[in-house]
Image (tube, helix red, strand yellow):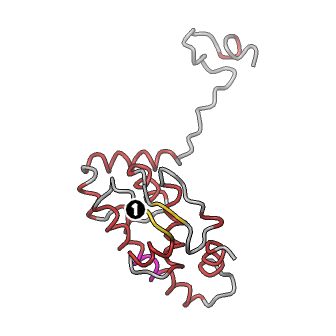
Amino acid sequence: MALLKQWRDMAYSETANKGDLQRLWADYFQKEKEIYAQLLKTPDETVKGTVKELADKYEVEVMTMVGFLDGINDSLKEANPIEEMEEDTQVNLGFDKELLYKNMVAAGADWLYELEEWNDIFDEDKRKNLYREQKQSTTVRKEKRVYPNDPCPCGSGKKYKKCCGKNA
């Protein structure tokens, strides 16, 4: 069975004890934070290796590394083959800095996008702009509805129904 399926079965189990799942995620989030802190110290370096080698490098279990690879995959410059990943699969952690920051914001992972290591990568204004861009990208805006007797939005001074709304 592929490692990703094992990770997801374990981490998102419907039948597992809630307390066990909470402990699993609390432990995972702490280790994830430590890995990101190390990666962000040298953000332009692409870390490569097998899943097992990276797990050893960051001193985590293979399943924790699989969860990490699943989480970071959408932020990588070159995606890893996570669906069929095994311990000896070659993977990389070459991430797009802006995309990673935005994805952390999108996930609501303040413990990650507020890591102090980001201060050396982006200044405060850049981080605020990336945060705002991400939040605005998921905001649905409804356009103001134009009714037939409203002034036409084109500025002609005519009613909408007699102008641009004539053929609508």
> Quadrant location of residue 147?
top right
Q: Name the residue under label 1.
A: 47
Most prominent secondary structure in the magenta stretch? helix
Q: Position of residue 148 (x, y in %)?
A: 69, 21
Is 8 colored magenta in this rendering?
no
> Quadrant location of residue 21?
bottom right
Closest to the observer, 16 or 163? 16
Q: Is residue 147 above or below residue 140?
A: above
Report the residue at 70% width, 17% height from top. Answer: 165
Q: In this view, does 156 lie above or below 97?
A: above
Q: Where is residue 60 in the image (x, y as percent from the top left)?
A: 43, 80
Q: Position of residue 79 (x, y in %)?
A: 54, 55
How many C-alpha atoms fall within 10 Å of the one at disc 1: few (<14), some, or many (≥20)? some
Report the residue at 55% width, 90% height from top. Answer: 19
Q: Magenta span covers which residues?
A: 26-31
What is the quadrant of the C terminus in the image?
top right
For numbered disc 1, what is the local secondary structure? loop
Q: Residue furthest right?
A: 167
Q: Is residue 162 above or below residue 139?
A: above
Q: Relative to residue 141, is residue 127 drawn left or right?
A: left
Report the residue at 57% width, 18% height from top. Answer: 153
Amino acid carrying label 1: it is Val
Closest to the observer, 142 or 61? 61
Q: Where is residue 129 in the image (x, y as percent from the top left)?
A: 35, 45
Report the residue at 57% width, 8% height from top. Answer: 156
